Image (tube, rainbow, N blue to C red):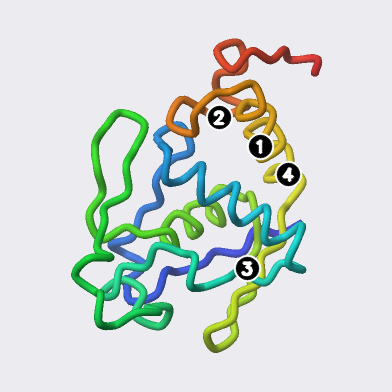
Amino acid sequence: MTKIRYQPENTPLATWTSVPLIAWGKDHWSTLAFLENMAVDNGGLVRVTHMRTHPSVHPKYDHDGEASERKAFPTRLRDGSELTCHDDWSCMEDMIDAGMMFALMRDRKVWVNFTPFGSDVVGALRAFKARGNLYSDFSGYYFDMEAEGGTEDA
């Protein structure tokens, strides 16, 4: 399977760098879980109004123009730092770049489809949450399995 490069909206390719998986925090992991839910329960169609949208980063998906200033929340990373101008769509772009999913974007509709790698990671995330843990404490199935309570054979 060929990995398709996706260039985020309104960002020149030369200046865009994705957030590495190991640095993802609560916002990335909760967005991943939401997108997986959309893939399973909604035929892959993403509910745009449920995505945190920064109006100047992804204006096409800005679903409440009047509340633009309130919606410009940063993305929280694992180390506690924050990325301004990075919304749930940016998190999805990071997931696409990591090879976890593909997205079909037409007009204001977005469909997602998970790769086998993405399904493995989201499965580990769900198991982690089922044990009563928080998204902010998940570090990634392939990077820190022992800390997540898993084994390499699982």
Mark 1 is on which residue type? Val
Mark 2 surroundings: few (<14), some (14-19) or many (≥20) residues within 10 A:
many
Residue 61 - label: none
Cα distance in 3D space between marks 1 and 4: 6 Å
Instruction: Kindly identify which residue carries mark 2.
Output: 140
- In this view, 24 is above or below 48: above
Marks 4 and 3: in contact by CB < 8 Å?
A: no
Cα distance in 3D space between marks 3 and 2: 21 Å
- Quick check: 129 left or right of 80? right
Cα distance in 3D space between marks 2 and 1: 7 Å
Residue 121 - label: 1
Q: Quadrant of the N terminus?
A: bottom right
Cα distance in 3D space between marks 3 and 4: 14 Å
Marks 4 and 2: in contact by CB < 8 Å?
A: no
Does label 3 or label 4 sit earlier along the sequence? 3
Q: Quadrant of the C terminus?
A: top right
Q: Residue at x 42, y 69 (%)?
A: 8
Q: Nearer the viewer, residue 52 or 146?
A: 52
Does label 2 or label 1 sit earlier along the sequence? 1
Instruction: Kindly identify which residue carries mark 3.
Output: 103
Mark 2 is on which residue type? Gly
Q: Position of residue 74 (x, y in %)?
A: 26, 52
Mark 4 surroundings: few (<14), some (14-19) or many (≥20) residues within 10 A:
some
Marks 1 and 2: in contact by CB < 8 Å?
A: yes
SS at circle 4 = helix
